[in-house]
Structures are given as C-alpha cells and as structure tokens.
Amino acid sequence: MSALLEIRDLHVTHAGRPILDGVDLTLERGEAVGLAGESGCGKTTTALALMKLLPGGFEQTGTMTLRPPGVEEPINVERRTEAGMQVVRWRHVSLVFQGAMNSLDPVKRVDSQIAQAIYLHERPASAKDVGARIGELFTTVGLTPALGRRYAHELSGGQRQRVMIALALACRPSLMIADEPTTALDVVMQAQILELLERLREQLGLALILISHDLGVLSETCDRIAVMYAGRIVETGPVKEVFAAPQHPYTKRLLDSLPVIGGSRELAAAIPGGPPDPGDLPQGCRFRPRCPYAAEQCLEDPALREVRPAQAAACHFAPWAQWPAAHEAAAEGAAG
Amino acid sequence: MSAPLMEVRDLSVHFRTRRASARAVDGVSLEWRRGEILGVVGESGCGKSTLARALLGLVAPTAGEVASDGASVNGKTALRELRRNVQMIFQDPYQTLNPRQRVATIVAEPLRVQGVDGDHDARVQRAMEDVGLDSGRFLDRYPHQLSGGQRQRVAIAAALVLEPDGLICDEPVSMLDVSVRAQILQVLIELRTRRDLALLFITHDLSLAWSLCDRLAVMYLGRIVEHGSAVDVIERPQHPYTQALVAAVPVPSAEARIREPLSGELPDATSVPSGCRFHPRCPRRFEPCDSVDPPLLAAGSDGQLAACLLHDPKRAPDAVA
Amino acid sequence: MTERSVRDLLLGTWRGRIGLGMLGLFLFLAIFGSAIAPDNPDASSLDILAKPSTDHWLGTTEQGSDVFSQLLVGTRVSLVVGFAAAAISAVLGAAVGLLGGYFGGWTDRIFDSLENWFLVIPTLPLMIVLARLLDPSLTVLIAVIGLTSWAGTGRIVRAQVLTLRERAFVERARALGASDGYIIRTHILPNTLPLIFANTVLIVAVAILSEAALAFLGLGDPARISWGTMLENAFSSGAPSAGAWWYVIPPGLCITLLVLSVSILGYLFEEYVNPRLREQQA
C-alpha cells in the first residue's frame, strides 16, 4: 500500500536564507506523526509548505506527493498551481493553524463560517445538506449543534478550538495538520482536545500531523515522531522508542528538561544559548555549538541515517547505548 | 518560627458588573513563608492571578485581609513597604517591558519610583549579574533587540534591584520555549539559594509545580481545594479535582495510559455552583455535595488538606479517598 | 524601533525623498520667501493681469502685483497656519485622549461626549461661523482650525491608551507604587507619541486646506497674503474668465503639492508606527 503523503527533499528559503533544509517525511493512511521542536525550527514552515501557503518571498523546492484514498492519480502538490491547490486544500489536507481559535470571524456566527468553507470547496446539493453536515461535524467534535448559532466570543477557548477542528474536517480530508492545537489551553482542556483527536483518528481513519513543542502532548497522540532543529529533521522513529531511547543529543536534552511526575525532581541543566540564526548557521552539525558531546568530526554535517530498527538520527555518534555525563569543558565550550 | 512573609485570611475579591458578581477569589486563606517556593496551580479563570494581584494591592479585596510579616497591610505606608519587599514577574515577556525604554532604565526604574538613595548603578549591575545578563552588552539595548528569554531576565533583574524578600511569578515561563524555560527556571532557583528569596509560583503546569515548589495550593473557582507539600499533593492527590488534573497531564513515557479526561469546563465566576463548587464535574460526588460547602479538611499525609466531604469522617466514614 | 529606521524610511524610499524634498523646499520658502521675492508682493502697478514675462515670471494680479512674489510670500501663511493649527489639535487631542483613556469612568464619559460633539459637527460650516463671529486674523484662523480638528486625534489616542493601560509594564509600575502621573508620563505618553505624530502630520494637510478654503471664502486675514487669498482675489476679479491661468493655477498647484508632501510623510510615518504595514513593505 502506498503512503498517503510523501515529502522528499523539501527546501524552503527566504531572502536567500535556508529555513528548511532537505526535509523528508512519509505518512501512511490513518497514521499520526508528531513534529517536535522549538520555535524557529521549521515545523510550521513545513506545514505551510505542504499546503503551499507560504507567503511571497519564500521559495520552496522538493516533491510532495499525496495519495488520498479514492483518488486515482497521485497528487503532485509541488506542481499544482494556485487554482489546482483549491481542490487539494481542505478536501484532502486541512490545517488547524497555530492560535487558530482566535482567528474566527468575530462578526459572523460560527456555523456560517463552516458553511463558507464547505461552499468554497464543494458544490453541495442544498443549504439543508450543508446544515445537516455542520450539525454532524459539531457532534463529531463533541459540541452540541445548537452552539453553531453563537458568535466566537460567546464560546470558551476549548469550544473555539473544537470549532476550528470541525472547520478543518468540513470537507472530509484524509489528512489533518494541527499546529500547536493545545498550547493556549489548560491541562484539562488539552486532555479533552487530545482525546478528541484520538477519537477522530479511530472514527474517521484520519491521518494526523501534530506539531508541538510539548513532547508530552506528542507522546500521547502520535505513532511516530520527527524532531526538528534549525530547519532539519534530526531524529525520527516510533514515539515509544524515541522517548525510551533517544538517539540525538537534542532529543535527549528536550526529554530531560521535562519534569516527569513521580521521577526525579531535579531540574536538568538548561541547554545554554539558543537555536542558530538561519543567516548564520554553524559549520557542520547545526547543534554542535550547544551540544555537550561535540567533537572534531561534528564539523562535518551528519546525515539522517537509520541507527536502530525504524529509528533514524543525524548524529555521528549514534546509536547511543547510554548517555555519558557531559564533560564540564564540553558543556562550557558549547555555551559559546 | 518567624511570621510568614505574606498571609491572606479569608480573602475575597468580587468584581461587580451590572448583572452579577464575579467571585474571582472567594474566601482564600494562605500562608507564604520566608524562603519557600509556594505554588498556586489551577486552570485559567480559577482566580490565581487575581489572588496574586490582591497580594500586592493591585486589586482591592472585597473582604478578608492581606498581611505581611504578621501585620495587616493597611494604609499607604504599609503598602509602600510591602511593594518594596515583594515584587512581581508577569507572564508575557513581549509585553512586560516598555518598548521605548532601554534595559538600563527599565532595571533602574524601581529604584526611582521607590525613591531609593545611593548607588543605583551598583544595584543594577548586581541584578544583571544575578540573572546572567552581561551588563556591557545589554544595558544599552531596547526590548525589541532581545529574545523572549532575555526579556524575562530583564524583568527579573528589575524585580531584584530593590532586594526584595519575595517574588511573585505569574506564569513566568509558559510563553517561552522549552530550552529557554529551563534557563529561566534555573535563574529563579539560583536566586532562591543566593538571595534567600521566597517565590510564589503561579502556574497551570502541574509537572513544573511538582518539580519546583516546596508547598502547593490548588485553586478551583476562587477557592483553595487542596493544600500541602508539592510532592504529596501531586503524587498522592486527595481532592477529586487535583486527581483529575494530575491524570490529565501528558507524560512522555513508554507505557500507554488510560485516559478519561474530566468533562465540562470551569464554570464562570459569576455562577458558582451551590455546595461544593466542584460537584457538577466531580466523578466522585455523593449525596451532600450539592448542598454542603466543605472546608479544608485533613487528608492524606501530615499537613495535607483537601476541601472534600470524602475526607469528612462524619459524612463519609467508609469513603476511600 | 530605533531612529535609524525612521531615517531609512525617510531617506531610503522614493516617497520619503520626494515628500521630504518638497516639504523642505516649502519650508525654505516660508522662511526666506520674502527675502528672495523679486518684487514687493503688495506693490501695485499699472500692468494689470499681464501674462508671464521676464519682468514678472508668473505675470501680474488684477492690481498689477507680481504673482511670483505673492506666491513665495504666501507660503509662510499656509505653513504657519497648517503647523500651528495641527499643533493645537495634537495637544488638545492627546491630552483628552490620554486622560479619558487612562482614568476611565466619568472623566472618560465626559470627554467622549465632547469628542462626539466635535466629530459630528460639520467642520467647514463651524469654521465659517466661528470665523465670521470673530475678527479675522491669523490667530483666530489657527484657533478655529485647531479647535475643530482635535477630536479625531483624541479618539485614536484614547484607543491606544486603553490597550497600553493593560500592558504588563504598566502593571509592573503600579505594583511598584508608581503614581498615575508618573505612569502617564513615563509609560503611556512615550508609547502614544508615534501615533500622535503620525496623525498630526495628516492634520497639517487638513489645516492647510482649511486655511485655503476659509481664505477663499473671504474669511482669511485680509492683511496677509496667502495662497487662499490669492485664489480669492483671482476669482473675485474675474481672472479665470479673463484667461489669466498664471494667477489661478500656481497657488492651487502649490496648495496641492504642499498637502501632497505632508500626506506622503504622514503615511510614511504611519507605516513606521504600524508594524504590520512595515512588514508588508519588506
């Protein structure tokens, strides 16, 4: 069975500076992949590139192939024009933007906004059909259909997020991208939304790309995870494996900085510094200046390669059987 | 034992609108001891930020009292004194600095406002060192030239310059990236050791509260529903709400978890349910819960309190909490 | 943002250079106009409504005065009235907006009603009435224009103050026990200045046009020459029907160009103040 989505060698530049540098991603039907990383690493850019929604000034190259169920010919997204993309967007791939719950039109009732999306992408039989569909969508996301008559400000944050998800499902896509869907929500609402996403996957066979800087959130919902740093994927693998045995120092550090209830209360030492500026990338491995294990050979760019079954990492020293304590000198040098 | 740095007794803050009264803080009694990290957790809308503001007199209490060092904070002099001893850090690093002022001005401002004599420069220097910012590089900069983490450090430096005894931190890291978060937390912890600073840490991140705080108070709809040492409260929660919160925390572990998230949402502060305010959402409610408002009762470990009738031996003698 | 980016906008873009250049030229004329004018603009001669020639580059008026000299001298009035009226409007509007927005409650309600009143009244008729009631002079003109245009600024400033008031850095200052006056001075006002400035520059344009309109309607200061009075004299002496284009077009063109240059700078400044507009340019 061929994959639902195949992204090969995606490069995105902006004003000559590399934002995404050779991203490969594969997604099977019904699978959930998490894109992890901090702000600026390129996760949102990847999502926007896939939907061809990058603003002017951004150049993208690489292939993005979609094979949605029920569609004969594979869709080569990179070759589609803007008109061609109208058919792809929302119908096959939809996107819940970051902070989307604040982007509902404040002067329109909520159901009319979903109706608008349906009319834009399909030619529904009648207004009654659309109404029925919206009611169905609301129920699917756990909202009472009556809430459709409300305005955005009359709904809570959690309810608005559910509306955005309903909006993303309006045209029955086979793939949904959710960019930081729970970041602004409380832990209880977050759990509710994540549980909803899981249910959607079961009921609708929906494939999911979940973007988050919160590894805990990704661990609960995703089958596989791709960790991004400075425009590149530095580790991929099944979520349980990556968390149990990370193979890249950055992943390890990210996991370490998450306090786990019931474990050690000691906060891990913070990674000094910050991600590199796209205009001023370090030579070789991009994590080298902040990596406590950096050595001579790290001046050479490590390729993303399989280091354990189904797990790939871009590190010369992978596979890591265990993680040695960082040398004091190495840690200090890395802080520079 | 010395008097607590700050204390509130039966504090209520109600906001009146034309139609109703929003009971943001509704009868809270809490002690914040010197040198301790006290956490206040709860969902947004539970009143924790209002509580913090009431401590510093930024909102006027409707009832109850705010005390510092054992004495009630009444009158201008007491308030002024308090505002020198206790400082506050805010959530959004992008809003917390005046975009038209240089870092040097921002950090020295408290000294000007409070009319402190002496060498401002030396204090500013020390504060910058304490937060890990190189004065030479940063004093001349404007906020837009700083990253989120750096801005938050400047805010902390400005809070330190008056050499306070306590720092109220209202979600100081929730808007920062993971690695920056760790850096800022490191700064705060070091301050506790180096300057013997007490921290009041307000957050909705339970894992963070668990790893950072000494003691913890859980707030729901304006009331403290559980209170005790952070480890006890999070690892052995005694109130159904705390239990639900802890269960909802996503954990990057290798085992699968059974999920049954709490249903519904935090009600509006204008319509507080009768009896125990949590009862409409409580999976363990029983007969008296909709009419009796439970006080904080002893539950679980020594010093742990939960406002739940399940811990009232008279009403629920066989309940296993 | 820093001063450097304002300079970039002003000197680095074509709009900035043109706007600044034109305004600079008019400023120069306003100051030195009377010194470099070839003839005494009030001097009459027998050479009535003469065509442009080497003696009179832009011909003469119905009284035989040199149009070119009048044009140069008239620059001063237009600019003085424009800037002075805009300044009054800015100070009034800013004060009302700041105080109403910051203190809220009854202060705000009273100021808001005041603003409404001034916004609703049609400005030109109000100006005409006021100019008629009071003796025409430059001061009166400036006052009238200033008083009728402050409400817009007031509104904009108030909106800005309302958001600023809730910002964390203001709360921090309050948590320190800073007085209202301190907060307004140090935190609110500096963050509203760019907005006030951008808005005021556009009001300068309005003021210049208003002066021209009032002067054209015969309500200007009769003792001074301005482009508006030139137009008034031109029309009342029948210059258009006499085909004396050199009398009618130059003052009108000057008004247009001055307003244009001020508007360009005003919009440029608005871009600087509004970061979203700036991004679209980049």
Image (cartoon, grey):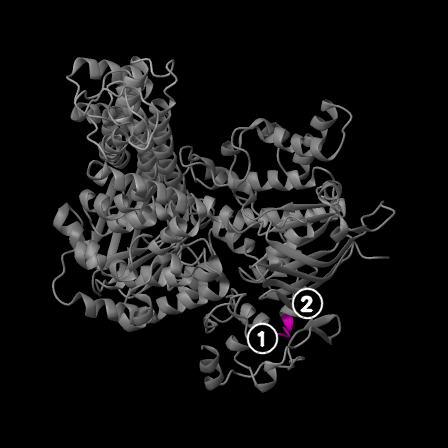
Q: Residue visible at 55% across and 55% down?
A: B247
Q: CA distance from mark 1 to mark 2?
A: 13 Å
Choose between B254 and B294: the one closer to the eye: B254
Q: Overall secondary structure of the magenta stretch?
A: loop
User: In the image, A275: left or right of A139?
Assistant: left
Name the amino acid type tagged 2: Thr
Q: Secondary structure at mark 2?
A: strand
Label ID, residue A249:
1
Q: In the rendering, at what x and y percent does residue A5 appear? A: 76, 55
Q: Which residue is mark 2?
A: A236
Choose between B258 and A68: the one closer to the eye: A68
Q: Secondary structure at mark 1?
A: helix
The answer to if A245 sits in the magenta stretch is yes
Quadrant in which the N terminus of chain B appears = bottom left
Q: Earlier in the sequence, mark 1 or mark 2?
A: 2
Extent of the magenta region = A244-249
Relative to B302, is C45 above or below? above
Q: In the rendering, at what x and y percent does residue C72 appear? A: 26, 34
